[in-house]
Image: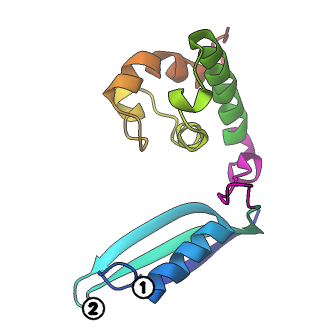
Amino acid sequence: MQIQFATFSLPPHPQSAEEEALNTFLRSYQILQCQTHFDATQSRWCILVHHTLKKTAESKTGTSRVDYKEVLSPEDFVVFDRLRSLRKRLAEQEGIPPYVIFTNEQLAEIARQRPNSRSALQAVDGIGPGKAERYGDQFLQALVPDVPHT
């Protein structure tokens, strides 16, 4: 997988042509990471986007689907897959959709960051104290490959 970089500069006001160009770009590629910085001297947002060369396939709803096997390192994908299996099992037990527990993007971030505590788990966007309390221990245990996962 080749990682590429793209830069954007946006004015602080919404709905500019530059903003639409950025949004079109973000919908078109698999995004790995974005970094933003406000340049007060120019009064503009500076955005650095890390992305793959591969364009995303649009789903029927028009949203992009991420192939986590391509986005994550092989080691991180093994962890992601293990977390996804745990999420599926828990969702079936609770009779809820898997994404209610954690989204795929949250699982990918957990696989990348490998948090070692509930508070570190909360550093993942969208995971608050409630989810960390309810599911944290099980997902943290799943990050340790030597521990049997049932």
Callout 1–callout 2 Cβ contact below 8 Å: yes
Please give the residue where the numbered disc 1 appears in the rendered image. Answer: 9
Please give the residue where the numbered disc 2 appears in the rendered image. Answer: 42
Q: Amino acid at mark 2?
A: Gln
| CA neighbours of label 1 inside 10 A, class few (<14), some (14 to 19), many (20+) | some
Q: Say above or below: 62 vs 88.
A: below
- What colouring does the structure picture have? rainbow
Q: Say above or below: 70 vs 57.
A: above
Q: Quadrant of the N terminus?
A: bottom right
Coordinates of residue 101 in the picture (x, y in percent): 52, 27
Residue placed at 63% from the left, 27% from the top? 83
Coordinates of residue 126 in the picture (x, y in percent): 41, 40
Residue placed at 39% from the left, 83% from the top? 10
Residue placed at 60% from the left, 14% from the top? 95
Q: Is residue 6 left or right of residue 89?
A: left
Query: Please, what secondary structure does the residue beneath circle 1 have?
Result: strand
- Residues rendered magenta in the picture: 58-75
Q: Quadrant of the C terminus?
A: top right
Res 145 visible: no
| CA neighbours of label 2 inside 10 A, class few (<14), some (14 to 19), many (20+) | few
Coordinates of residue 127 in the picture (x, y in percent): 41, 35
